[in-house]
């Protein structure tokens, strides 16, 4: 996959998610603060990881840059979620925005 110009050179491609990620790894696992971009180069996420599991706050963004979700994780388990609907089309899939009432 060719890295889009909007993605930092140091970012790695994460094929399971079709996203690019920039952050640290410990023993091959995501660890610490990460930033992710969609395959097309649009910014999509900032999150915290511990030993390959999301741990702490994860913020995901709609295609238009607006906040989509703020999720709280503890050792990979989702413990809280606030979703923000966009007035514009979105590819965000963590919350089924397309099936929610307006």
Image: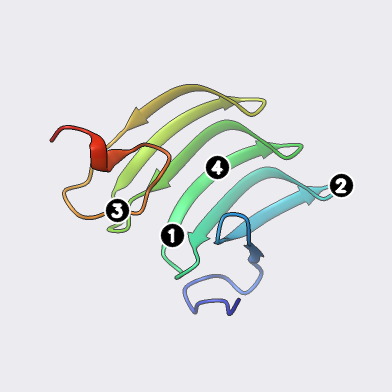
Q: Earlier in the sequence, mark 3 or mark 4?
A: 4
Seen at 43% across and 60% down, the residue is 43
Give left or right: position of 13 versus 66: right
Give left or right: position of 68 versus 72: left
Which residue lies under the disc numbered 4?
47
Seen at 58% across and 80% down, the residue is 2
Residue 6 in percent (x, y) is at 47, 73
Q: Nearer the viewer, residue 1 or 79?
A: 1
User: Of discs 3 and 4, which sits in the foreground?
Assistant: 3
- Where 88 sits versus 8, above or below? above
Seen at 49% across and 79% down, the residue is 5
Residue 10 in percent (x, y) is at 66, 69
**What numbered label is drawn on residue 43?**
1
User: Of discs 3 and 1, which sits in the foreground?
Assistant: 3
Instruction: Please report contact status of discs 2 and 4: CB closer than 8 Å, yes or no.
Output: no
Question: Circle 3 — which element?
Answer: loop
Q: Earlier in the sequence, mark 2 or mark 4?
A: 2
Which residue lies under the disc numbered 3?
90
Crowding at mark 2 (Cα within 10 Å: few <14, some 14-19, many 20+): few
Q: Nearer the viewer, residue 101 or 48?
A: 101
Question: Circle 1 — which element?
Answer: strand
Crowding at mark 1 (Cα within 10 Å: few <14, some 14-19, many 20+): many
Seen at 57% across and 55% down, the residue is 17
Residue 79 in percent (x, y) is at 51, 19
Crowding at mark 4 (Cα within 10 Å: few <14, some 14-19, many 20+): many
Quarter of the view holding residue 88: bottom left
- What coloring was used for the rendering? rainbow
Question: Circle 2 — which element?
Answer: loop
Distance CA(mark 2)–CA(mark 3): 34 Å
Q: Residue furthest front?
A: 99
């Amino acid at each position: 996959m060719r890295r889009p110009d909007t993605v930092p050179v140091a970012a790695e491609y994460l094929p399971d998610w079709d996203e690019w990620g920039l952050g640290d790894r410990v023993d091959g696992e995501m660890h610490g603060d990460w930033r992710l971009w969609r395959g097309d180069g649009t910014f999509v996420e900032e999150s915290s990881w511990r030993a390959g599991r999301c741990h702490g706050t994860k913020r995901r963004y709609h295609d238009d840059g607006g906040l989509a979700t703020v999720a709280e994780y503890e050792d990979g388990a989702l413990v809280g979620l606030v979703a923000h609907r966009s007035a514009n089309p979105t590819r965000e899939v963590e919350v089924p925005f397309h099936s929610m009432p307006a």
